Image (cartoon, coloured by chain):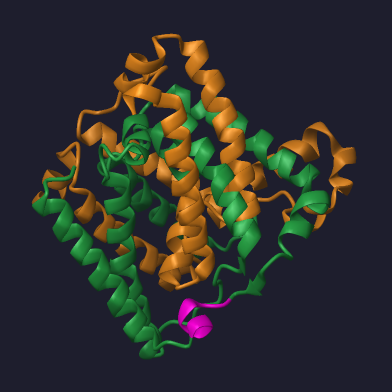
Chain colours: A green, B orange
Amino acid sequence: MEVTFWEFIWSLLLGVLFGIALHKSGMTKYSTIINVFRFRDLAVLKFMLATLITAMPIIYILQALGLLTLTNINPTYIAGNLVGGLIFGVGMAVSGYCPGTMSGGTGQGSIDYLVPGLLGFMVGAYLFAKTYTSVFTKISQVGNLGPVTMPDLFHVNTALFIIAFIEITLVLFYFFEKKGIK
Amino acid sequence: MDWIIEQMKKERWSPYAAGAFFGLVNVLALLLISKPLGASTAFAKLTSYAVKFLHPSEMNNTYFKFILPPGINFTVIVVVGVLIGAFISAKMSGDFRWRMITDEQWVQHFGPSVRKRWIIAFFGAILIEYGAQMAGGCTSGLAISGTMQLAPAGLIFIAGLFAAGIFTAFLIYGKKY
């Protein structure tokens, strides 16, 4: 165990809320996932953007008030982030799941999430480990910027960046609803 | 409380509402455990465990030995929580069923063969975990956790994910795209 008692309790609770959000938003269904890539049902995109525009300003405000310090900003290494995303996208379109929804799908009783999903993830992780030095250590050096943020990188004000992100997203949402885009 | 039960009995929430709710959960993670949520690492951790028991000699691998040694870290517990949360949600809304193929759309397009669904999903899952490990996270741990912290990595990953997803869906569905 690498977690303390309270970390265990909180992680479990956060996971439960995470699972509820995934099931209630329909992310644990193959059709929801594949149809965003066919532009037939944008629930995935709407869900992700709504998550981001909720979390971004709260995180910013908590930081400004000194109540939160970000210690785990995801490192940017452009080639690896992009190629990893491309491989991930193919897998997602083929299977209709991702790591979180595989677990959520299992919770709704889907054996076709649990068995092939768990086995596939473990084989994928194993292959990654086997190719770690030959592939990852090389690709992660291409465009390696470390744990930077976009406002730092582009020298823009963080609050302005977040406001612009929220505004663009809201305009997009307004457009979706006005045109009746599912 | 009644309101919460009423919401839990609904099979679907609007994606906007579900997203806003999930945004709060992501912030809560930063406050409660000082770590952004994620899921893909959990499976790498479990793989590390499996390798340790089945093939101890392979533990000399740099990755298993130094980067992700076997263990139960918080993502494993989060993933178990996700399973429980989705179970509660499915049960309360009457959506829980044992299923060998989850989706009607799959059956319409690929036919009712369970073996076909499982084999295709298995290969998809390999790509998902490999890609997530390479990129540094999955839809949760990088696309959302990264982007909400304004890391360029998150948006680069989202761009790759959608580009490849759209292209793959186009190849799979062909004329029915």
In which quadrant is the C terminus of chain A drawn? Answer: top left
How many numbered discs?
Answer: 0
**Residue shown at 17% from the left, 45% from the top:** A181
How would you classify the magenta stretch by its main secondary structure? helix
Q: Residue visible at 34% across and 32% down?
A: A29
Q: Position of residue A114 (x, y in %)?
A: 50, 28
Residue at position x 51%, y 59% in the image: B142
Which residue sits at x=74%, y=65%?
Answer: A141
| Outermost front residue | B175
Q: Is residue A161 visible?
A: yes
Magenta includes B48? no
Residue A150, magenta (yes or no): yes
Q: Nearer the viewer, residue A55 or B2?
A: A55
Question: Quick one: B22 or A169, which is closer to the camera?
Answer: A169
- The picture places residue B99, in percent across and down from the top left corner, at 37, 19
| Quadrant (top left/top right/bottom left/bottom right) for the N terminus of chain A | bottom right
What segment carries the magenta color? A148-154
Instruction: Indicate the quadrant where residue B123 lies.
Output: top right
Residue A58 appears anywhere in the view: no
- Residue A119 at what x, y percent from top left? 61, 29
Drawn side of residue A37 relative to residue B69, left or right: left
